[in-house]
Image: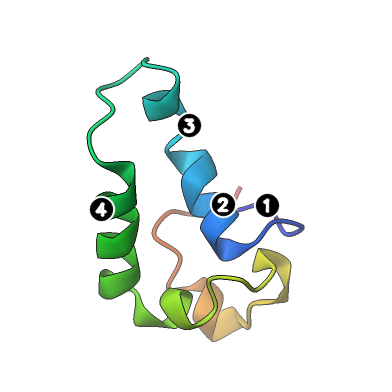
Amino acid sequence: MFASMSVTDNLLLGAFPRFTRARPKGDIKADLDKAMELFPRLKERRDQLAGTLSAASSRCWPWPAP
């Protein structure tokens, strides 16, 4: 998780290999929408800087922080 980036930007960065064709592209927007459905706290905070998430909200993150 990159603290100076928004929640959405962090999730899109996780999809970077799909943008570069290193992996099947699929429907990135649909996958992002699904992630937001699975983690409603992240959806509420999608424009918030990831570094400002509370400890409880950061535990909702779909992958471990570095």
C-alpha gap between disc 4 and disc 2: 16 Å
Counting residues from the N terminus, which is met first, the one under dot 1 or under dot 4?
1
Give the camera-side residue of 17 and 1. 17
C-alpha gap between disc 1 and disc 4: 22 Å
Mark in the foreground, 4 or 2 = 4
| Amino acid of disc 3 | Phe
Reading the image, the residue beneath label 2 is 10
Mark in the foreground, 4 or 3 = 4
C-alpha gap between disc 2 and disc 3: 10 Å
Counting residues from the N terminus, which is met first, the one under dot 1 or under dot 3?
1
User: Dot 1: few (<14), some (14–19), or many (≥20) neighbours within 10 Å?
Assistant: some
Using the image, tell me which numbered label, if any, was put on residue 30.
4
Secondary structure under the numbered disc 1 in the rendered image: loop
| Amino acid of disc 1 | Phe
Point 60% across, 53% down: residue: 1
Height in image: 24 above or below 13? Answer: above
Please say if the residues under marks 4 and 3 sit with CB atoms less than 8 Å apart: no
Question: Horizontal and vertical percent for residue 50?
Answer: 65, 66
| Amino acid of disc 2 | Asn
Mark in the foreground, 1 or 4 = 4
Using the image, tell me which numbered label, if any, was put on residue 16.
3
User: Dot 2: few (<14), some (14–19), or many (≥20) neighbours within 10 Å?
Assistant: some
Height in image: 49 above or below 23? Answer: below
Counting residues from the N terminus, which is met first, the one under dot 1 or under dot 2?
1
Question: Horizontal and vertical percent for residue 41?
Answer: 43, 82
